[in-house]
Amino acid sequence: MTEHATLGHQTRPRVRVTLRCVALAALISATGAGCGGTQDVPIGRAAADSVPSGSMASDPDVRTAIALPVQGRHLILTEMRGMLTSVQGYVAAAARGDTSGMRAAAQASGMAAARDLDPAMQQRLPAEFLRLGMSTHAAWDSLAMDVGRGAPGGQALGRLGTIMSNCVACHAQFRINLER
């Protein structure tokens, strides 16, 4: 719904933001890879040995497991939590009408946030995981630029929804495990 806010002699459209949908998307994203569950179980023989013999039990989590050493896993999960923090900061700033806060939150998860990924780590990650991650960082930078140029609130919120679609797709497809 669009309302008009009168600020002195100017009338500006103001978008009423429904935070329930954004909060739900953030919650769904947070419950994916890296936030508990089977991704904390190391890959390897020990995990298979924990199933009683003769049992046909299998892991219901069919996401692609990415096995990383502890530091690599920590780096990736920290980056993901940073993006979730950006979503929270962006939504909170949008609710206040604080465009500089929105821009700062978006910039925090831009391409600069991916600078710590060394080439050896990149080689360990599936191409689709890298594509989703890099396109998400680029989308954050693009959103920050659009907000800085005065993009309408509804358009900017829609862009955040697109970014969250990348997050949801990645968490639905991948899980991060400790390498054995």
Image (cartoon, helix red, strand yellow):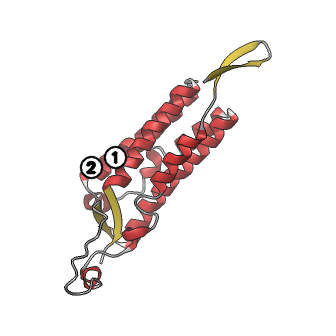
Q: Nearer the viewer, residue 111 or 45?
A: 45
Circle 1 residue: 132
Label 2 with label 1: CB-CB less than 8 Å:
yes
Query: Horizontal and vertical percent for residue 179?
Result: 31, 74
Residue located at (43% from left, 44% from top): 111
Q: Nearer the viewer, residue 54 or 93?
A: 54
User: Could you say whether the residue bearing mark 2 is in a helix, strand or loop?
Assistant: helix
Query: Horizontal and vertical percent for residue 171?
Result: 38, 54
Query: Horizontal and vertical percent for residue 48?
Result: 25, 80
Residue located at (29% from left, 78% from top): 180
Position of 41 compared to 64: left or right? right
Query: Horizontal and vertical percent for residue 17?
Result: 61, 33
Q: Image quarter for residue 139?
A: top left
Q: Quadrant of the N terminus?
A: top right
Q: Image quarter for residue 52?
A: bottom left
The answer to whether residue 23 is visible is yes
